[in-house]
Image (cartoon, rainbow, N blue to C red):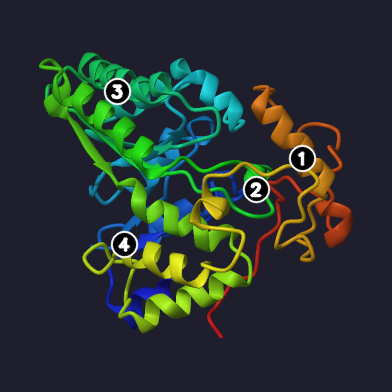
Amino acid sequence: MVENGVKKSGFEEVGLLSLSSADHSEIAEVAKGLADRYDGTNVSLSLPSTRVDAFNIDLANELSRNGRRSGLTFAPEGGSERLRKVINKMVSEDDLIRTVAAAYSSGWRQVKLYFMCGLPTETDEDVLAIADLAKRVIATGREVSGRRDIRCTVSIGGFVPKPHTPFQWASQLDHETTDARLKQLRDAVRQDKQYGRAIGFRYHDGKPGIIEGLLSRGDRRVGAIIEEVWRDGGRFDGWSEHFSFDRWVAAADRVLAGAPVDLDWYTTRERGYDEVLPWDHLDSGLDRNWLWEDWQDALHEVEVDDCRWTPCFDCGVCPEMGTDIQVGPTGKQFLPLSVV
């Protein structure tokens, strides 16, 4: 598939993309095979953001064997340890520091850290903890590498609750609070004379996230809002230069004028267990009661283990989908895949 894609497209960058590529039981063999094939060429190989606890420096070195090391991306997602418990991201600050220390000491010079703003129960302090973590990353990189040209890029995405997840009942953070927290964080990074210049900062403001939240958890009435935006000239709204928050707000006001709901009802409001959600008639395989219990665990900061290594949690997926969890390596030689 990679050979065909490179040959037909002319691109020379190959990303092994999935929800969690480093968890694939055969990822080491796949990476080595591709690195062998494209050794000495201009084709670069990369992984998307990697879980801190799944990172393997040998794997990273295989993918960068041709000398192109653009950087490594990790996704702690929550700035504080408390917040990472809420989203069940069981990675401590020390875990992250050990991982980036291994990367910097192996010759990597740049690390990108991905976080989210607006997670359930988040406070200003949780977001400001991102700055402290980034500074510690730079300090660690300088210490283990003995160099000053160490870089860390902090990338912030707005949290948008999604259907068929434990957070489908959560309220979304309003755009004013999102922007205020991001400004505090940006100022905390820039004002640090020792580490601030080594830390890059990328983020999106809160307004597009509110519209994404409307589209994410909307019911049939939102279809009329989309059409109204289009009739009012809305095009290519995924591009910031074409996006108009005011156009979406005005369209929502017009369409929902006679309805008992508004834009905030779809976005910044927390749902209750008894509310019938617009997607409840669709079956994703996950049991609704299990999702609710997981949501309550999140609010109480209860960590839930990976079900690959524990007894079944009865989430509903395996029996509903007629499958079983399979952990490799399998020891089998897989047939090569090709694009049909």
Q: Quadrant of residue 142?
A: top left
Instruction: Give the amino acid at mark 1.
Output: Trp
Decide: is 61 above or below 2: above
Which is more toward the observer, 155 or 274? 274
What amino acid does circle 2 point to?
Gln
Residue 96 location in percent, x, y?
43, 23
For mark 3, give the secondary structure: helix
**Please, what secondary structure does the residue beneath circle 4 have?**
helix
Contact between marks 3 and 2 (CB within 8 A): the answer is no
- Earlier-in-chain disc, 3 versus 2: 3
Ranked by sequence position, the earlier of labels 3 and 4 is 3
Q: CA distance from mark 1 to mark 3?
A: 33 Å
Q: Earlier in the sequence, mark 2 or mark 4?
A: 2
Q: Earlier in the sequence, mark 1 or mark 3?
A: 3
Label 3 environment density (alpha carbons within 10 Å; few <14, some 14–19, many ≥20): many
Give above or below for 336 relative to 183: below
Residue 192 image offset from top left, x and y in percent? 15, 17
Q: Are marks 1 and 4 in contact (CB under 8 Å)?
A: no
Q: CA distance from mark 1 to mark 4?
A: 34 Å
Which element type, helix, strand or loop, lies under badge 2?
Answer: helix
Q: Amino acid at mark 3?
A: Ala
Label 3 belongs to which residue? Answer: 131
**Is residue 127 left or right of 268 when viewed as pictured?**
left
Considering the image in quadrants, where does the C terminus appear?
bottom right
Alpha-carbon neighbours of circle 2 within 10 Å: few (<14), some, or many (≥20)?
A: many
How far apart are the two marked residues, 2 and 4, measured between alpha carbons?
26 Å
User: Which residue in the structure is indicated by mark 1?
Assistant: 292
Residue highlighted by disc 4: 246
Kind of residue at badge 4: Asp
Choose top left, top right, bottom left or bottom right for residue 243: bottom left
Residue 168 tag number: 2
Q: Give the image location of residue 8, x and y in percent.
A: 35, 83
